[in-house]
Image: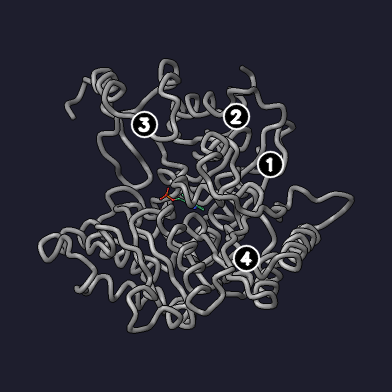
């Protein structure tokens, strides 16, 4: 892109590019930013203005833009092998990545199946659960259970286990029905309840449903610890421990969608580690490639894998994508895992998190803020009496303060990359407070 032509590029984009999750008409008032380049936590537009990427570009970027180590790995991979089909062929990046991820689960989830985006990983987990039951002679297990406020992607199958009205209602007639149980969202605590009490109540709702029709249910799908897209609804790890027990007792698969919360986002590499459990299927995407390339995968147990192992083609898992296991994407993921290890990222994030939480104290105590919450590298709070267009106004005002932030309804959240300096942390907190006050002042 040439410099000084920002308005030109905006006009051309609005004519020819249909932007995601966007009412295009809103761009008559909401700014569209043409990005020229990125460095670290910052994105730069064509006029040289910069924006701190406080939401990791939709939760994917872990170690900053144009990260030198991921760049170097990709440049090397580019001259070796850009892509080869993964049926009948294999390659070093996909083998190493599968081995390293399996090792992170103590080899409990020892088999990795690949795709390109998060929604596809969810589709795979749903199909694999159903098909494995059928291969085991339990073809009647066909139903899926999701949580209130769940988000698992926007393809038809994933949308069927998503409970965000905006995304779901419009396409309702196209979707297969699923069962919805209570969310363990700790904000529902009443009468002196703790987060654990809410978790127990939510688990009791799962038990009720499993007792009633567990023989028809293939799997329950959960975003562990934080239901992100519904507005960063956080719950106690106890919920996951209890649901794991119920799944074992009633022979229902547990699918954990760690697409947003995996890769260290909640403080541990996998969110479910904090509950001391492993699922039957674990979905990863978003951060796994460091935010570089589309990559997703489903990890599963050996007994599931064995349910498909046969001489019969129709007992095999019938699913593929053209770019399954793309070597460049896998290589970016390997570089990402290497940074976790070399830089002791989880440890350093605890220090970063403590500093940002402290810097956000004026917002936590703000009279127009409720439910200030944090887990790992996720912060969120809800605006009291937020105007209807709060989210859009916040986004536009944040840009004026060098911030990229997109509230979800009245919920302001931060999901920054794991590289913020002390100065960037303090600036993020101070600017967020300024933006919040400015938006509420109208
Ligand atoms: C983003 C997300 C998805 C969908 O991933 P896409 O790559 O956008 O298809 C699924 N589940 C969760 C929890 C997500 O946050």
Q: Earlier in the sequence, mark 4 or mark 1?
A: 4
Name the residue nearer the viewer: 436 or 324.
324
Residue 420 in view here:
no
Which image quadrant is residue 307 in?
bottom left
What SS does tag 2 mark? Answer: helix
What SS does tag 1 mark? Answer: helix
Characterize the local packing of mark 2: few (<14), some (14-19) or many (20 or more) Cα atoms within 10 angstroms. many
Q: CA distance from mark 2 to mark 3?
A: 26 Å
Numbered badge on residue 436: 2
Q: Earlier in the sequence, mark 2 or mark 3?
A: 3
Q: Position of residue 228 (x, y in %)?
A: 56, 49
Q: Earlier in the sequence, mark 1 or mark 2?
A: 1
Residue 404 in view here:
yes
Figure quadrant of the C terminus: top right
Residue appearing at x 44%, y 55% in the figure: 418
Count all numbered tags in the image, as a single digit: 4
Badge 2 vs badge 4, beta-carbon distance below 8 Å: no
Disc 2 under 8 Å from ligand 1? The reply is no
Badge 1 vs badge 2, beta-carbon distance below 8 Å: no
Q: Earlier in the sequence, mark 3 or mark 4?
A: 3
């Amino acid at each position: 892109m040439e410099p000084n032509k920002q308005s030109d590029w905006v006009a051309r984009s609005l004519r020819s590019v249909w932007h995601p999750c966007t009412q295009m008409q809103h761009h008559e008032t909401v700014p569209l930013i043409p990005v020229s380049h990125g460095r670290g936590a910052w994105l730069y537009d064509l006029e040289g203005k910069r924006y701190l990427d406080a939401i990791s570009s939709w939760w994917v970027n872990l170690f900053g833009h144009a990260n030198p180590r991921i760049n170097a790995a990709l440049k090397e991979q580019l001259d070796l092998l850009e892509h080869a089909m993964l049926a009948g062929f294999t390659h070093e990046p996909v083998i190493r990545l599968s081995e390293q991820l399996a090792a992170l689960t103590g080899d409990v989830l020892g088999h990795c199946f690949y795709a390109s985006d998060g929604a596809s990983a969810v589709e795979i987990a749903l199909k694999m659960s159903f098909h494995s039951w059928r291969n085991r002679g339990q073809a009647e297990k066909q139903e899926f259970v999701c949580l209130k406020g769940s988000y698992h992607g926007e393809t038809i199958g994933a949308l069927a286990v998503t409970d965000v009205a905006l995304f779901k209602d419009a396409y309702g007639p196209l979707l297969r029905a699923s069962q919805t149980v209570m969310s363990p969202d700790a904000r529902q605590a009443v009468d002196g309840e703790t987060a654990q009490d809410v978790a127990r109540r939510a688990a009791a709702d799962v038990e009720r449903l499993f007792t009633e029709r567990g023989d028809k249910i293939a799997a329950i799908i959960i975003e562990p610890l934080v239901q992100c897209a519904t507005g960063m609804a956080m719950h106690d790890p106890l919920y996951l421990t209890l649901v794991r027990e119920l799944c074992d007792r009633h022979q229902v698969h547990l699918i954990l969608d760690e697409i947003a919360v995996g890769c260290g986002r909640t403080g541990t590499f996998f969110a479910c580690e904090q509950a001391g459990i492993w699922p039957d299927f674990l979905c990863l995407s978003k951060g796994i490639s460091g935010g570089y390339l589309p990559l997703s995968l489903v990890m599963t147990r050996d007994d599931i894998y064995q349910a498909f192992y046969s001489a019969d083609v129709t007992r095999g898992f019938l699913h593929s994508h053209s770019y399954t296991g793309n070597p460049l994407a896998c290589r970016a993921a390997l570089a990402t895992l290497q940074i976790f290890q070399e830089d002791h990222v989880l440890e350093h994030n605890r220090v970063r998190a403590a500093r940002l939480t402290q810097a956000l104290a004026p917002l936590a105590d703000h009279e127009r803020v409720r439910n200030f919450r944090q887990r790992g590298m996720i912060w969120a709070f809800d605006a009291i009496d937020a105007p209807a267009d709060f989210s859009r106004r916040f986004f536009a005002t944040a840009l004026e303060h060098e911030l990229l932030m997109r509230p979800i309804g009245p919920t302001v959240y931060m999901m920054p990359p794991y590289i913020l300096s002390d100065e960037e942390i303090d600036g993020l907190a101070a600017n967020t407070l300024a933006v919040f006050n400015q938006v509420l002042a109208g």
